[in-house]
Amino acid sequence: MAATTLTFMVPKRQILTKDDLEKFRESDAYNDFVSFIERLNNSAKGLPLGTECFISSTSTKMLELLDKANTYCEEIPPVQNEKSRFGNPAFKVFYNRIADNAEELHEIFSLPPEAIKEVSRYFMKSWGDLKRIDYGTGHEANFIAWLLCFEKLGLIGPDDYTSIVLRVFQRYIDVMRNLQFKYWLEPAGSHGVWGLDDYHFLPFMFGSAQLIGHKYIKPKSIHDKDVVDEYSNEYMYLACIKFINSVKTASLRWNSPMLDDISGVKEWKKVNEGMIKMYKGEVLGKLPIMQHFMFGSLIYFEGSSNELKGQHLECDDNHVHAFGQEFPDCCGIKIPSAIGASQMNMKEGTFRRLPFD
């Protein structure tokens, strides 16, 4: 896409009805987004995180930007809020620092100056919700949209895909884990917005791609603590399993029944194919998630937002919801962080595993 032919715009929401969602799923924007994820997925097949790969100047700058976000996290301590298992208000300070500096931070890239507002908005929205202090797969999708913008502008290409997954995306997940632990971010939506570990989906997809063809690690190996501990630094999927084990009591068959079911599949290739299909249906196909996705000139889609101007669509959390998704369906009932609950239990000396573990 030639940047010179575009009129850049700040992304805004366009999916506000079920008809909008169906229209989106038949659009070029949907096909571009899915195709980009599939290309990233394919680039990671059979590769542990430590694999040597080409890292372009753009990827290097992305890593610098993510390091800056992590520095903000390190500089902003959580508020003393020990009696609450819900999100820590200090996250709002972190979020606002990202928002206040997002455009300036993007000046390190070779972006057209007029594109910075558009591209940086996706980066800003990748970290969670300011008011609800939560995070889910919709925010994760914003990070992929941010990456896609760079491809649309010709700043990354096929040679970058492996480093984008194994370095850039992995670094994003590292920073998000820091945020989740530090600020006890709540799972977005009543069901963790279909994240397989309350928060994320894509590390399971890319992680299952990494494990395709592995001689020893099989889908059922997620139940082997020694395997998970030894290889979690090299495979995203196992890192996610280790995360779940660290914050939830009982075994996977109780706290993560879907992952337990998936572990019965014989080959990682089949797991990966299922993850792609599930992502299309359970993330990109769900109105409670996609109602919050934004579109600009680089990821372009026109829904009914202009037609619905002036109509009352605000929920109790002071943002616009989609028709048919009125509160609590819009955002879900607030769910406390499993991280917060486990850390509080350990502080209080009440942490214990269930007898059927």
Image (spheres, rainbow, N blue to C red):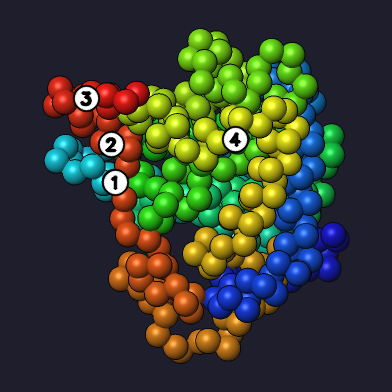
Q: Locate the C terminus by quadrant.
A: top left
Tell me the mark number nearer the camera, choosing from 4 and 1.
4
Task: State the residue in front, 195 or 266.
Answer: 266
Of tags 3 and 2, the one toward the viewer is 3
Q: Nearer the viewer, residue 115 or 227?
A: 227
Task: Report the Cα–Cα distance between label 3 and label 2.
Answer: 12 Å
Q: Nearer the viewer, mark 4 or mark 3?
A: 4
Q: Quadrant of residue 218?
A: top right
Up-down: is 188 above or below 94? below
| Residue 18, quarter of picture | bottom right
First-in-chain label (2 vs 4): 4
Which element carries disc 4, helix, strand or loop?
helix
Kindly check if marks 2 and 1 are in contact, taking CB atoms under 8 A apart as contact.
yes
Q: Is residue 14 among what the camera can see? A: no
- Residue 97 image point, x, y percent: 41, 48
Q: Secondary structure at mark 1?
A: loop
- What residue sits right under mark 4 in the picture? 262
Residue 354 at x, y = what percent? 27, 27
Q: Which residue is mark 1?
A: 336
Question: Where residue 340 is drawn, which disc sits there?
Answer: 2
Q: CA distance from mark 1 to mark 3?
A: 16 Å
The correct choice, above or below, for 305 with respect to 136 in the image is below
Q: Residue at x 73, y 62 (%)?
A: 30
Q: Does residue 185 lie above or below 24 as drawn? A: above
What amino acid is found at the position of numbered circle 2 in the picture? Gly
User: Which sits earlier in the primary sequence, circle 3 or circle 2?
Assistant: 2
| Mark 3 residue element | loop
Sequence order check, earlier mark of 4 and 1 = 4
Asked whether, in this view, residue 198 is left or right of residue 42, the answer is left
Residue type indicated by callout 3: Phe
Q: Which mark is residue 351?
A: 3
